[in-house]
Amino acid sequence: MSALSCKDLRARGEESGMPIFDPLSRATSLTLLALGLAGLAACGADAADPAPPLKPVAAGDAARGLRLLTQYQCGSCHAIPGVPAARGIHGPTLQAFGKRSYIAGRVPNFPETLAQWMVAPASLVPDTPMPSMGVSPEDARHMAAYLGQLE
C-alpha cells in the first residue's frame, strides 16, 4: 500500500487525521495568551505584600544545625562550608546546598525531605551509599536549616 498525499485524500473525500493549521486560531491563541499575561502583570507586587519565598524554609535553628553537623561528623565524608574540619571527599560537597533542586540527585530538596534523608537515607533512596548515622528527627531538622541556608 502506498502512502497517499493530503491532496489525494481530499480528492477521495477522506481526511488524513492530521490537524489543519489555521493562522486565525494561532493569532487568537497568541492574543489570549497576551491578555492573560497582561492580567497577571496588572496584579503586581504590593510593597506591603511581599512575594512568598520560592522554597520552603526549614523550621529549625541553623546555628544549632552547624554544631550538630560537626557532632555527627558529617565532614568525614562531605566538605561543608562553615563546619570546622569538614573536608571529606567520599560524599559530595554540600557547598550551596540550599540552591540544589534534588537530594542525592533523586529526591526533591525540601526541608522536611532533607531531614528525613538525614535520619534514614535508605528510606528515600534504597541503594544510596550514605549511611544512617543515628540522627534524631529533631537534630535533622536543625541540620536541614543550616544546609538550606547555604547558597
Image: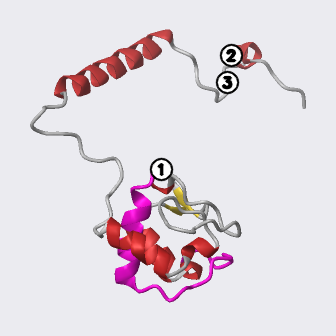
- For marks 1 and 3 on the same chain, the one whose residue lies earlier in the sequence: 3
Which dot marks residue 99? 1
Q: Which residues are magenta?
A: 124-151
Q: Residue at x 65, y 68 (%)?
A: 88
Residue 129 among those drawn in magenta: yes
Which dot marks residue 21? none
Is label 3 in contact with label 2 (beta carbons under 8 Å)? Answer: yes
Looking at the image, which residue sits at the far front? 84
Residue 77: x and y in percent read: 64, 72
Foreground residue, 129 or 122? 129
Residue 51: x and y in percent read: 23, 40
Please give the count of numbered marks on the rendered protein.
Answer: 3
Kindly identify which residue carries mark 2: 10
Q: Residue at x 33, y 57 (%)?
A: 56
Residue 140: x and y in percent read: 41, 77
* Mark toward the viewer: 1 or 2: 1
Q: Quadrant of residue 44?
A: top left
- For marks 1 and 2 on the same chain, the one whose residue lies earlier in the sequence: 2
